[in-house]
Image (cartoon, helix red, strand yellow):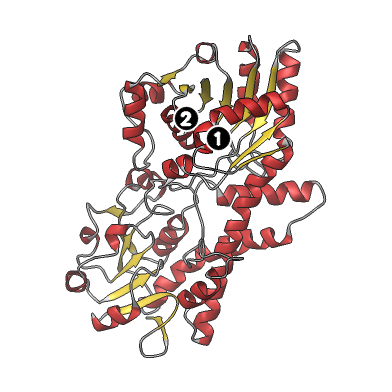
Amino acid sequence: MRIAMIGTGYVGLVSGACFSEFGVHVTCVDKDAGKIERLKNGEIPIYEPGLDDLVARNVAAGRLSFTLDLKEAMQGVDAVFIAVGTPSRRGDGHADLSYVYGAAEEIAQHLDHYTVVVTKSTVPVGTGREVEAIIRRVRPEAEFDVASNPEFLREGSAIGDFMRPDRVVIGATSDRAGEVMRRLYRPLYLIETPIVVTSLETAELTKYAANTFLAAKITFINEIADLCEKVGANVHDVARGIGLDGRIGKKFLHPGPGYGGSCFPKDTLALVRTAQQVGSPLRIIETVVDINDKRKKQMAERIIAACGGSVDGKTVAVLGVAFKPNTDDMRDSPSLDIVPALQAAGAHVRAFDPAAMHEAEKLLPGVEWAKDAYGTLEGADCVAILTEWNEFRALDLRRVKSMLKRPVMIDLRNIYNPEDMAKAGFTYTSIGRPSPAGGMDRG
């Protein structure tokens, strides 16, 4: 089989490379000449573990290629995927679909045989029908169907998510389109992956419903953590106690400074706006959006409180600025609220992140960037952990303590044990857990 993948961002590049690993011939298309040239030279524009090897292997096998020419890419394809960005639109929070609709117009110009046009981008309900209308308007005689195939990839583990997914969701407008999509995903039948075939509208809504539910789950455990701090309970034990219930599940029950990234912030907001527009508001998700926005801003206050109520003239060592580990993605990262708030309070921030500093430098002016985790610590008044990179989990605590002015750690990801930190002589602040002495470990 042959497909074209429009867009070489996170979704397009990962999906294209993974389809080629299935044995499909994939041509990835982008308008950014510099990006295409870098990809042809083996340079991967995003950080995703294992992606460089996957791309190199399939390029060498002749199954994966990159081009600026959509007409060339669409020659003889069974399907063309739209995997362009759908950022939040300025002013109203709706998804900006201009790139999707622009791609649909260009696809229409080059259709010369039956092709399934697939929206891989995260799009609101009704987008697939509009894509179909655009193509019909440009090329009334064209033979095609539109399908929706939302992605459920987690940054940092996207290749595994594609190769061994919980499910594949396909919204198809005809049996013929559904059969093409089943053939593309045939390797997953061999490992008995559930294939859910639905209408276009159902597939589109499923993606948003999944992301907003997970965002709500994160927000729920964050609020429970706050309650734990008030009543002396341990949020980790609460999370385990409820997560072992099969109806709830243990994933996404890890308290922290709020969700960020490329999906949850924009998708929750987009679904809220869609629901309001059709007169069926989602009050729960509206509250989730509000709570998460406020929570990220509140985290700086925790750091300031742990430093005695003021950081004016003090140095704060920050470990991790990406929104999660194993990615360089800075979109809506809690650090974008926390670090400027610390600076506004008079702090000098010295930071390190294993992957995201090249992006963070553009977004966090005035930060001193260190070469490694220990490089942030010398003479700092406290250390704050904002991202749970594995290399931060096993720091030499004696060395950390000797480098700081005061042994103060604010662990916003709860990667250390309060008892261990007390034994090591740290004033330790985490989220939703009691200190060894019975009070809260809030410093």
Mark 1 Cα shell of 10 Å, populated few (<14), some (14-19), many (≥20)? many
- Residue 177: quarter of image: top right
Q: At which x and y percent is residue 383? A: 30, 68
Mark 2 element type: helix
Q: Looking at the image, which residue is at 64% across and 11% down?
A: 113
Horizontal side of 271 relative to 412 (left or right) equals right
2 vs 1, front mark:
2
Q: Amino acid at mark 2?
A: Phe
Residue under label 2, please give it. Answer: 19
Tag of residue 85: 1
Q: Looking at the image, which residue is at 69% across and 44% down?
A: 205
Q: Looking at the image, which residue is at 44% across and 46% down?
A: 155
**Of callouts 2 and 1, which one flags the residue occurring earlier in the amino acid sequence?**
2
Horizontal side of 280 relative to 58 (left or right) equals right
Q: At which x and y percent is residue 379? A: 21, 68
Residue 246 versus residue 205 in the image, above or below: below
